[in-house]
Image (cartoon, rainbow, N blue to C red):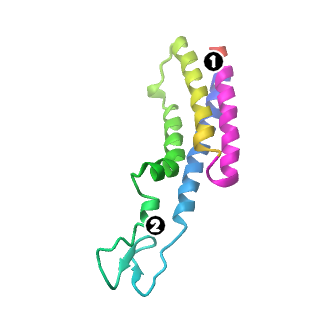
């Protein structure tokens, strides 16, 4: 069945997008704490102040570059993860309707979604893997467009 092959390819694109996000986060977490005369490391990413003002903001330089609700940090860092999870969510059978009109509309929605995923959640992340993932997502968008014409 062509429809199932199309779905499998889109599922592959979804997992690839999620892996791009995981690699991107991993790259951000690769920088580790380095002790100094005034600070020691409390785990690999947190500083503990040994001298001076114990309330000084010594963890802003690293921790909040990964874990922050600052929109410029949050969206830049976590977009591939959220888009990968959202595209995986589209493959949960309980959330799919079996009517042919819905199928056609869903394929068209997925086409747009995979284009957005390629542009905003793949190409700019995780080096070569992101570029590869972007082209796989563009291909998935074309596959969805073709599939919408079969339904």
Q: Residue at x 52, y 49 (%)?
A: 76
Label 1 crowd bin: few (<14), some (14–19), many (20+), radius 10 Å:
many
Q: Which residue is mark 1?
A: 148
Query: Toward which corner of the image does residue 12 lie, by quadrant?
Result: top right
Q: Secondary structure at mark 2?
A: loop
- On screen, 63 above or below 114? below
Q: Position of residue 31 (x, y in %)?
A: 53, 69
Residue 134: mark? none
Q: Secondary structure at mark 1?
A: helix
By secondary structure, the bulk of the magenta-drawn segment is best described as helix
Residue extent of the magenta highlight: 124-147
Regarding residue 145, the answer to whether it shows in the image is yes
Extreme bottom residue here?
A: 37
Q: Residue at x 61, y 26 (%)?
A: 111
Q: Residue at x 48, y 47 (%)?
A: 75
Q: Which residue is mark 2?
A: 62
Disc on the earlier residue, 2 or 1: 2
Does the segment drawn in magenta span residue 144?
A: yes
Query: Toward which corner of the image does residue 118 lie, by quadrant?
Result: top right
- Quarter placement of the C terminus: top right
């Amino acid at each position: 069945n062509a429809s199932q092959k199309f779905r499998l390819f889109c599922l592959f694109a979804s997992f690839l997008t999620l892996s791009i996000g995981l690699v991107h986060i991993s790259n951000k977490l690769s920088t580790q704490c380095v002790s100094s005369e005034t600070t020691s490391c409390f785990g690999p990413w947190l500083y503990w102040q040994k001298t001076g003002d114990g309330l000084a903001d010594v963890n802003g330089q690293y921790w909040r570059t990964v874990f922050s609700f600052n929109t410029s940090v949050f969206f830049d860092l976590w977009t591939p993860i959220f888009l990968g999870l959202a595209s995986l969510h589209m493959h949960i059978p309980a959330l799919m309707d079996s009517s042919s009109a819905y199928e056609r509309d869903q394929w068209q929605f997925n086409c747009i979604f995979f284009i957005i995923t390629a542009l905003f959640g793949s190409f700019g992340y995780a080096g070569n893997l992101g570029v590869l993932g972007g082209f796989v997502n563009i291909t998935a968008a074309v596959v969805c467009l073709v599939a919408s014409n079969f339904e």
